Amino acid sequence: MSQMAASTTTGSITLVPGIRVGQAQRRTDGWLTGVTVVLPPPGTIGSVDVRGGGPGTHETDALDPTTMVSTVDAVALTGGSAYGLAAAGGVQRWCEENGRGFAVPGGVVPIVPAAAIFDLGRGGDFAARPDAAMGYEATLDAASSTEGADVVRGNVGAGTGAAIGSGTFKGGLGTASVRLGGENAHIVVGALAVVNAAGVPWQPGAQPPAVGEGLNTTLAVVATNATLTVAEAKRTATAAHAGMARALIPVHTLADGDTIFVLSTCAETLLPHPLAPFASLIELQSAAAEAVRLAILDGVSRATAVETPAGMLRPFPQTTQGSI
């Protein structure tokens, strides 16, 4: 059956046409944190699924399929825990200046959901955390990027202060994409992940690491050019968490704020299978999970050692990373 032909993996969320990524970070004078902004084309719809027990989020309720607004103007991923959610204000400012948002009398209200990782104090200064200015800087970086430009990975953006293994090893930002097979080969599913997990990369026979003092979260944005409803985007976000579970052990703990956003640019039609109407959507959701898994492993493998007044974070040992 040609429509269920094998999918192929490629390199970046920005291979989804129209998706741009921008980043801002600080790494000196007590800072080790940053912001990553995913900027989709106007009219993109979105949803979210939060699985961690300790999330730090903004505007996620607006992405429920039963709410009034279906479109998303940008997604902000940030360090700084709940304090860092202030970065979303800078993203909104850029969107308002550029006429992006839900139209209301007198102007627009940008819909900018956001989620944060806990990296407070990892640079040495607990008060050094993202704000609206850093969010604006990251959005400018996204807006000025060339469509299709690759994403810088590792110790950048929201991955700047990320750590894994409850703060034992350096985490980072990664990305990947998967193209569907057969008659849906025009459909691309990309993922970007910020890996700040309580867990470490999973491998056969691995045991969960001991619980440490670090507070944690893995964040991901999945994007596709396939046309989805908000409800289908919500179900895709749910399915994509399987990729997080395949990449990390443990996952979705009380100490994690694991969150996955899904964006659909609605540029292409997902062709249904003639004998199984939902098969193509299931294939897309499976691709979303695989893209998330690959993006997480990419983020861990791209992370580099960092030494600050708060201590040393070394890369996760390559010899034990299994499929990384």
Image (tube, rainbow, N blue to C red):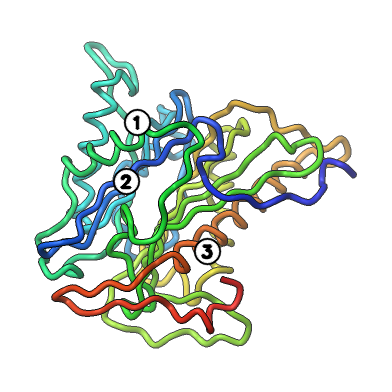
- Label at residue 144: 1
Label at residue 231: none
Please identify the quadrant where the N terminus is shown.
Answer: top right
Nearest the camera: 215 or 67? 215
- Earlier-in-chain disc, 3 versus 1: 1
Q: Nearer the viewer, mark 3 or mark 1?
A: 1
Q: Residue at x 43, y 76 (%)?
A: 199
- Mark 2 crowd level (few <14, some 14–19, many ≥20, 10 Å Cα): many
x, y percent for residue 43: 47, 24
Total tally of numbered discs in the picture: 3
Circles 2 and 3, Cβ within 8 Å, touching? The answer is: no
Quadrant where the C terminus lies? bottom right
Question: In this picture, is 144 found above or below 84?
Answer: above
What is the distance, in whole Å, between disc 2 and disc 3 at their CAs?
Answer: 23 Å
Label 1: element kind: helix
Quadrant for residue 56, please give it: bottom left
The mark nearer the N terminus, 1 or 2, is 2
Type of amino acid under label 1: Ser
Image location (x, y in percent) of residue 198: 38, 74
- Distance of mark 1 from mark 2, alpha carbons? 11 Å
x%, y% of residue 236?
Answer: 58, 47
Q: Residue at x 44, y 24 (%)?
A: 42
* Residue 215, image x, y percentages: 29, 71
- The reply to whether residue 53 is visible in this rendering is no
Disc 3 secondary structure class: helix
- Near-viewer residue (142 or 146): 146
Q: Nearer the viewer, residue 279 or 244?
A: 244
Which residue matches tag 3?
A: 244
- 99 shown above or below 10: above
**Three-letter amino acid code of the residue under disc 2:** Gln
251 left or right, relative to 139: right
Q: Are marks 1 and 2 in contact (CB under 8 Å)?
A: no
